[in-house]
Amino acid sequence: MKAIYKSVPALEKCFQILDLFARSRRPLGISEIANRLNYHKSTVFNIVYTLSNLGILENGYQNKFTLGTQLYVLGKAAARESELIHTVRPYLEEITEKTKLTAFLGILSKGRVVIVDKVDSPYGIRVSSEVGLSIPLLAGATGKVFLSQMSDDEVDRVLSQREMKKYTASTCSDTTGFKQMIKEAREHGVAIDKEEYIEGIRAIAIPLRISTGKLLAAIWVVGLNSQLTDDLIPGYSLLLREMGAEIEAHFV
């Protein structure tokens, strides 16, 4: 027996707008969306800003919108439809197997680092975070590798708009010193966090330079001080860079 239901016009319009973004593959403004779909501008305004608040869309340059981070998270839950997540997942599994540390994939969204996939370490005590969690851009190794993918002008703009917060006694809260760390991450293709974001926690991060629009991505591993000792960092850094090069080759 076919279910009887009442269609919800707002939802239909919402998915028509998302479909338009998927087909357009470029940023769109409120007026253009309204004109192309023949919707009232006020209706589009309310739907688009609601989707933006939910992370489904992102508000960018000149108040134009693009598909947002939360779609990656939803894509992961829906059989890993995201090409990025699907491609990177086996490498995260291999990294975790070889390092016995939790491995993460993240992207930059709304000025924060958002975890879109992870593989938890199955060995002993592990350090982990949930998919969808966002991390401050100026925190630890991840921030350095994301900023290393930006131009010097973009880095200056980001640093001028944010307070250099001191998360731990090891955090670099000096702009000049932090810019030097970004420069080193750019030159060496890796960044290290020795308790700079969370006491007792270390991390190694590398950028993923992929040709998927303007998407900035990175992978990293996290562990306790006892799990990520100084003697292990060079080897694990090399492993991540090798994995990163293989991932990047998929997107050439």
Image (cartoon, rainbow, N blue to C red):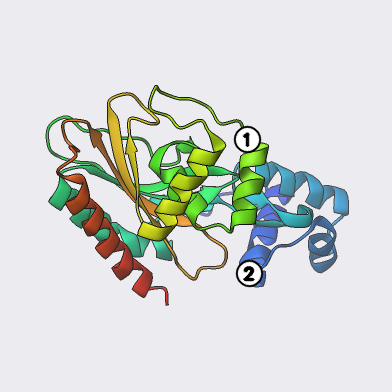
User: Residue at coordinates 70% horizontally, 53% vertically from top-left?
Assistant: 60
Of residues 214 and 183, the one nearer the viewer is 183
Q: Quadrant of residue 188?
A: bottom left
- Residue 71 at x, y percent in the picture: 52, 52
How far from the left and from the top, in percent, is residue 19?
A: 64, 64
Please state if 117 lies on the left or on the right of 121 as rendered.
right
Q: CA distance from mark 2 to mark 1?
A: 30 Å
Task: Give the structural element (helix, strand or loop) at label 1.
Answer: loop
Quadrant location, the C terminus: bottom left
Q: Residue at x 16, y 45 (%)?
A: 232
Residue at the limit of the structure toward the bottom, as seen here: 252
Q: Which residue is mark 2?
A: 25
Q: What's under tag 2, amino acid-wise? A: Arg
For this rendering, which residue is in front, 168 or 32?
168
- Of labels 2 and 1, the one closer to you: 1
Question: Splitting the image into 4 quarters, where does residue 78 fall?
Answer: bottom left
Confirm or deny contact between disc 2 and disc 1 (CB under 8 A): no
> Is residue 73 visible from the viewing direction of this image?
no
Q: Amino acid at mark 1?
A: Arg
Residue 199 rendering spot, x and y as whole percentages: 33, 23
Q: Residues within 10 Å of mark 2 (few under 14, many from 20)?
A: few
Residue 181 on image: x %, y %:
44, 45
The residue located at (33%, 30%) in the rendering is: 195
Between 220 and 89, the one nearer to me in the picture:
220
Q: Secondary structure at mark 2?
A: loop
**Mark seen at residue 162:** 1
- Is residue 123 shown left or right of residue 223? left
